Amino acid sequence: MMNIRPTAEAFTAALKQGDFAGAHAFWHDDVSSIEAMGDPAAVYGKAAVLAKSEAWMAAHEVHGFEVAGPYVNEDQFALTMRIDVTIKATGHRMTMQEVALYTVQDEKVVEERFFY
């Protein structure tokens, strides 16, 4: 069994520092991103996942971002996230809480799945 802890810890450290590009460097070229809801709820491939992330960032003003973890189990790790955010289109400010589950192969994230 491979030890994914170094990948999980480096990925998490990048997020905690607000280094989203650093975290994205851990994505596999064929990564998939699956949301609990949304349109689209799932996107596939590094370029599509990056575009989804950029679109989300463009649509929201982030006031605060907290990450806890990683919590590692075999080839997966989970993070809890708390995001203080304003939706730019409506001006609605809210605190989002979610769990993100990441699956790792060959030191790269092949799937991210969000629960909220």
Image (spheres, rainbow, N blue to C red):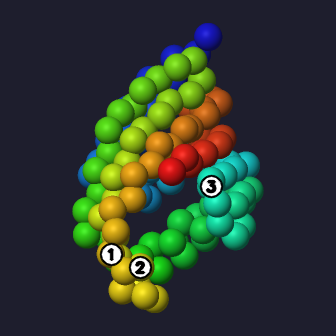
Q: Is residue 96 left or right of residue 109?
A: left
Q: Residue at x 50, y 43 (%)?
A: 100
Residue at image mark 1: 93
> Which amino acid does the dot numbered 2 rest on?
Ile
Residue 56 vertical placement versus 17 (above, below): below
Secondary structure of the residue carrying tag 1 is: strand
CA separation, marks 3 and 1?
A: 20 Å
Please tell me which of labels 2 and 1 falls first in the chain: 2
Q: Are marks 3 and 1 in contact (CB under 8 Å)?
A: no
Residue 91 vertical placement versus 109 (above, below): below
Residue 36 vertical placement versus 69 (above, below): below
Q: Are marks 2 and 1 in contact (CB under 8 Å)?
A: yes
Return the residue found at the far top. 1
Residue at image mark 3: 35
Q: Residue at x 60, y 45 (%)?
A: 113
> Which numbered dot is residue 79?
none
Please tell me which of labels 2 and 3 falls first in the chain: 3
**Quadrant of the frame with the N terminus:** top right
CA separation, marks 2 and 3?
A: 18 Å
> Which amino acid does the dot numbered 1 rest on?
Arg
CA separation, marks 2 and 1?
A: 6 Å
How many callouts does the rendering have?
3
Can residue 14 be seen? no
> Which numbered dot is residue 87?
2
Q: Bin the neighbour count of mark 1 within 10 Å (Cα to Cα): few under 14, some 14-19, many 20 and up.
A: some
Q: Where is residue 116 shown, x and y percent of the image?
A: 51, 51
Q: Nearer the viewer, residue 49 or 116?
A: 116
Q: Is residue 107 left or right of residue 21?
A: right
> Which amino acid does the dot numbered 3 rest on?
Glu
Secondary structure of the residue carrying tag 2 is: strand
Q: Nearer the viewer, residue 45 or 37?
A: 37
